[in-house]
Amino acid sequence: MDQSLGPSSLLAQVSTLRFPPAPLNAAHYREVFNRLSAVGTFNFAVAGDGVELATPPRESGDAMKVTIGRDAVQVSFDPTSKSADFAAEELLVILKEVAAVLPIPVFVHQTHVLRKLFPLGGPHPDARAFLLQGVVSLPQERLASWKRGFAAVGLRFVFAPQQMNDLSAHDLKIESFLPDPAKLFVEDTASFLVPMPAGQWDQLKDHLAEANRFLDDYTATLLRGRLSPDA
């Protein structure tokens, strides 16, 4: 199909870092809240056996939430208009404050869920037609008997862990974007199974960079139909 794929924009980033169960208490959570309040405005709420710190509603629609439990910390920018680099730096700021208070010697597992949008170019950009005809090449006769039109079309690819990349695994979803059929929605759940001692933030940056490259380079190349054999 005569359609081009534009550069991606970050729609959301949800990062979950797990650690061995720790004897956390209300004083720990309150101290984290006090430290994060020095770098941003958060509302504090008890959530199960942990806490949830969330930014108040913003006119831009951007939302940030920090959830801390006895064995995990999750930081989400969902939705967001930040760049991937800015979101990564802001994540580091938050995790450094959390690690400065909580007794977390090591993070045993990381999961980063990245959601992005790719705009389509061309005379009549339609992500549904692009996926059906330009990516999977589904013959039109197989769709002719359907009386209902497609509101959305999606694909899913699951990639097993690779030893060469810190045992990273990827669960990739590619869909037409319901609010705007001229855009593609892509989501990658990138898992990293190698422990990371608290304080080794360069390793965290590398993992986020790999997750972003997976969407911006590998996935974009797959969609353009020029997939290299060693990707």
Image (cartoon, rainbow, N blue to C red):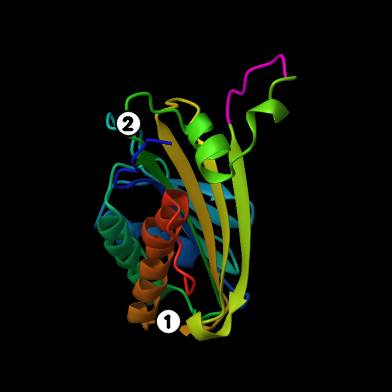
The vertical placement of 155 against 198, above or below, is above
Out of 16 and 146, give the one closest to the viewer.
146
Element type at marker 2?
loop
**Relative image position of residue 46 (x, y in whole percent):** 55, 49
Q: CA distance from mark 2 to mark 1?
A: 47 Å
Left or right placement of residue 71 versus residue 45 in this view:
right
Eye-nearest disc, 2 or 1: 2
Which comes sooner in the sequence, label 2 or label 1? 2
Q: Which residue is mark 2?
A: 122
Q: Residue at x 28, y 47 (%)?
A: 82
Where does label 1 land, which residue?
198
Q: Quadrant of residue 150?
A: top right
| Residue 77 is at least partly visible in this image | no
Count of numbered labels shown in the rendering: 2
Q: Residues within 10 Å of mark 1 (few under 14, many from 20)?
A: some
For residue 122, above or below residue 108: above
Residue drawn 32% across the image and 25% down it = 123
User: Label 2 amino acid?
Assistant: Gly
Vertical order, 50 against 23 (above or below): above
Query: Which portion, as a residue range, is magenta?
Result: 146-152
Q: Amino acid at mark 1?
A: Ala
Q: Give the main secondary structure, helix, strand or loop, of the magenta stretch.
A: loop
- Residue at 63 percent across and 61 percent down: it is 158
Is 150 contained in the magenta span?
Answer: yes
Q: Locate residue 149, reporting x and y percent.
A: 63, 18
- Which quadrant of the structure image shows residue 155? top right
- Crowding around mark 2 (Cα neighbors within 10 Å: few <14, some 14 to 19, many 20+) is few
